[in-house]
Image: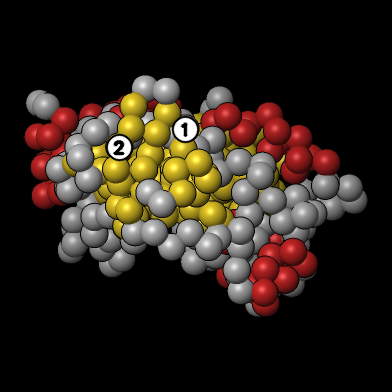
Amino acid sequence: MSPAEIYAQFKERGGIAELARAQWRLTGADRVRFLNGQVSNDVRKLRPGASLHACVLTAKGKMCADVRVSAGDDFLRVDAEASLREPLGARLERYLIADDVVLDDVTDELGMLHLIQPPGAHTSLDHPRIESYPANRFGFPHTDFPGTDFVGPRDELKELLSEFSKRAPLLDDAMLETIRIEAGVPRWGFELNEDILPQEAGLDHGAIDFHKGCYVGQEVISRIKSVGHVNKQLCGLASLDDAPLRAGMRLFAPDAPEKEAGWITSAAFSFGLARPVALGYLKRGVTADVLVARDDSGVSRVEVKNLPFVS
């Protein structure tokens, strides 16, 4: 099938994907207290079988990682972009001092599948070695069932993947990127890095609990909320002339062609809008609705769009 055909099936039936994620398992009596002091969301609210989105920050409020935390009966699990395996593992280990917590890197032991289903569809799984958690990873708009993670031994997940792919299309990395960008979901290594504050990427709308107790970086995050603005903001950009968009393109207002207004971080062809789209950052004070995106390979006129592109 062509990518357009797979996308059409996805919009009708949902999809299944294999995710490459670094994973850690936390056990011990202090696991909730410890992790709650490391992430921006409130781990104390998690019940077994649930998950939440959170940020790991520096003391200056900048991003260290974009993570999802899930809970079992006697453990917590943290997963993050695969490229963060070494730095995030070292960060968590560094803050373990006198805590009754055992932190195990289980990346090589466990795999992860992510199932997105249309409204009203539900999947129950009774498997002794595979766990499932609700997780809205790709901005699927139907909040009654945004998505489900399945975590378990890789061999057994292969069998589950084969079973799911009989009723929903298998989504490869390129299709997942299209879906992610259409939904306006920031990703580590693209929209997210060590120079980004969570509010700049819109992560305050779900990954931050402003009422929880202290955690690393909280003071800066709370101060930004009080001030009410950041110096740049993630936005959507759609091509007006069907010219391709590329990560790294710089953005300029038509009336100020030499003054950089922002930059593109991710780009894809949107099957939902039938034109190239991108995610990027606009600097504070930029008010133009139409911008020029350019790099050494070409120029495109783009319009600034609210996110998500497709809902």
Q: Is residue 13 above or below residue 111?
A: below
Report the residue marked by disc 1: 248
Q: Are marks 1 and 2 in contact (CB under 8 Å)?
A: no
Looking at the image, residue 281 sits to the left or right of residue 25; the answer is left
Q: Position of residue 96 (x, y in %)?
A: 83, 46
Tell me how far mark 1 sits from mark 2, CA to CA.
Answer: 13 Å
Can residue 163 be seen in the rendering of this structure?
Answer: no
The image quadrant where one finds the N terminus is: top left
Q: Which mark is residue 300?
A: 2
Q: Position of residue 191 (x, y in %)?
A: 50, 43
The local crowd at label 2, few if under 14, some if 14 to 19, many if 20 or more residues have their Cα within 10 Å, is many
Disc 1 or disc 2, which is closer to the eye? 2
- What residue do we see at 67% from left, 77% from top? 226
The image quadrant where one finds the C terminus is: bottom left
Can residue 224 be seen in the rendering of this structure?
Answer: yes
- What residue do we see at 60% from left, 68% from top? 229
- What residue do we see at 25% from left, 39% from top? 276
Looking at the image, residue 93 sits to the left or right of residue 255; the answer is right
In this view, the residue in front, 274 or 303, is 303
Looking at the image, residue 218 sits to the left or right of residue 245; the answer is right
Marks 1 and 2, the one that precedes in the sequence: 1
Outermost residue toward the right in this view: 98
Looking at the image, residue 208 sits to the left or right of residue 57; the answer is left
Q: Amino acid at mark 1?
A: Gly
SS for dot 2 = strand
- What residue do we see at 72% from left, 56% from top? 61
The local crowd at label 1, few if under 14, some if 14 to 19, many if 20 or more residues have their Cα within 10 Å, is some
Q: In the rendered image, which quarter is residue 45 located in?
A: bottom right
SS for dot 1 = loop
Q: In the rendered image, which quarter is residue 31 located in?
A: bottom right
Q: Amino acid at mark 2?
A: Ser
Q: In the rendered image, which quarter is residue 267 located in?
A: top left
